[in-house]
Image: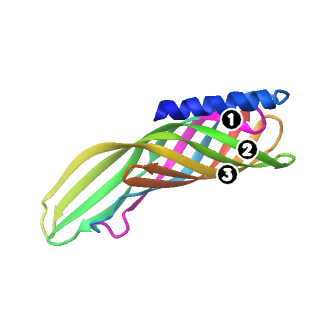
Amino acid sequence: MLKVIVSSMFFLAVCSTSVFSKAETKYYTGIAISSQTLKLDNEFKLYDNGEFKSTVFTPYVGYQFNQYVALEARFGFGSGNDNEVIASQPIKITDEYELENQQGLLLKLQYPLSEGFSLYATAGYFDSKFKVRSTYTQINSDFSQSSNGSFSEKGASFGVGAAYSINQNWQLSSEFQYFDQGSEKSEALSVAISYYF
């Protein structure tokens, strides 16, 4: 699946470059800060809402083929965790989730609206790893026990955003991203700053 996506991205980028051969190509890098919400499959109603939030820092690098097409690699890591109580009587069970890391490759299609301002859409493939900690506490007792684990989810990602170029080198952007990774879905709202070489 990943090979198909990468091949498709490369093909589109090459075709686009040939059509817009006069457009300037640039390497760029940057960092994004996002609030990401993991939405678990809550079919059995174990949680009140089955949503866990993380703050994610995502350095990225990219190549701008022209003003319309870019290829971007992102490498994110989470900070902080969120928890929910599954049961409270007679034993309190709390699940705590944290995004450990997240990496992916995506195609970025941009459309300039005016000088310095553009809208864009992204599509790609991401691999996300989560840490899980379950704590069991007996009510009215000193008994407490914890277990730790982790799991990974892979799948497609889609996003939309807006960008503003401060000057030739610096750009600010804001983005909404959706991750469809198996039974788990995630959504992220981010702000980012990019530097074009």
Q: Residue at x 75, y 39 (%)?
A: 68
Q: Amino acid at mark 1?
A: Ala
- Circle nearer the N terminus (1, 3): 1
Q: Amino acid at mark 2?
A: Gln
Which residue is denoted by mark 3 in the rendering? 161
What range is drawn magenta here?
A: 46-72
Q: Is residue 90 above or below residue 94?
A: below
Query: Which numbered disc, 3 or 2, marks the residue closer to the eye?
Result: 2
> Does the rendering let one see residue 29?
no
Which residue is denoted by mark 2 in the rendering? 110
Q: Position of residue 77 (x, y in %)?
A: 47, 41
- So how many labels did they put on this image? 3
Viewer-proximal residue among 187 and 170: 187
Image side of residue 155 versus residue 172, left or right: left
Image side of residue 121 versus residue 17, left or right: left
- Say whether marks 2 and 1 touch (CB < 8 Å): yes
Q: Secondary structure at mark 3?
A: strand
Q: Amino acid at mark 3?
A: Gly
